[in-house]
Amino acid sequence: MRYITTIGDQEFLVEILDDHNLLVNGLPYEVDFDAVSEQVVFSLLVDGKSIEAFVYPEDETWQVLLHGHLFTATVEDEREKRLKAAGSRRISDRAEFHLKAPMPGLIIAMPVDEGQPVEKGDVLVVLESMKMQNELKSPREGTVSRMRVKIGDNVEQRQTLLTVA
């Protein structure tokens, strides 16, 4: 499992290898992680060093008190971050919009047809990736002007799926 953790303006790629091993930005760490008495206190053994952290979940962030310093962290899995990035690009209301696959996968549904008008937020394509179904939505209103894939197609990341004019 790979996650992007953001603290301030720094991003850390965290890859969980197994119950006791992980990579942080490519550097290996051996960890033992346990909650203390079902509270917000966590005890970690990182490469043999004992560390205690207070971790408070909030709506979309985590507050982490570590060595007397308070950090606000966001944690997203790679798939979620790619989907957010694909949906947050600034889209012109006049230019054609080319929907591109945010990740490799299999097209399992296309609830629109070429020539069909669509509204902002309408589902254009359902892409299955890593056993998860991802609804790719229209960022604006327009008309589906060109379908470039069909149900059952395997697609690559950044491959154009369809165009909205």
Image: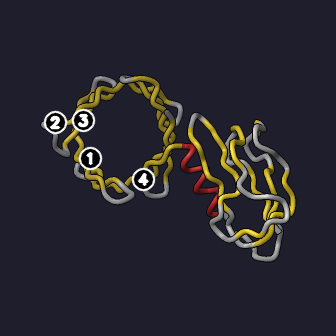
> Which residue bears the numbered disc 4?
74
Q: Position of residue 126 (x, y in %)?
A: 66, 48
Q: Nearer the viewer, mark 3 or mark 4?
A: 4
Q: Residue at x 20, y 46 (%)?
A: 40
Closer to the N terminus: mark 2 or mark 1? 2
Q: Residue at x 66, y 70 (%)?
A: 120
Residues 93 and 78: in front is: 93
Residue 136 sits above or below residue 31 on the image: below
Closer to the N terminus: mark 1 or mark 4? 1
> Which residue bears the numbered disc 3?
51
> Which residue bears the numbered disc 1?
66
Closer to the N terminus: mark 3 or mark 1? 3
Q: How has the structure been colored for display?
A: secondary structure
Closer to the N terminus: mark 3 or mark 2? 2
Q: How far is the residue under mark 1 from the one under mark 4?
A: 16 Å
Q: How far is the residue under mark 3 from the one under mark 4?
A: 20 Å
Q: Residues within 10 Å of mark 1 (few under 14, many from 20)?
A: few
User: Which of the 4 image quadrants contains residue 112?
Assistant: bottom right
Q: How far is the residue under mark 4 from the one under mark 2?
A: 22 Å
**Please, what is the three-letter code of the amino acid marked with disc 2?**
Val
Q: Are marks 3 and 1 in contact (CB under 8 Å)?
A: yes
Q: Residue at x 67, y 64 (%)?
A: 89
Q: Position of residue 15 (x, y in %)?
A: 49, 33
Q: Residues within 10 Å of mark 3 (few under 14, many from 20)?
A: few
Q: Position of residue 44 (x, y in %)?
A: 26, 32
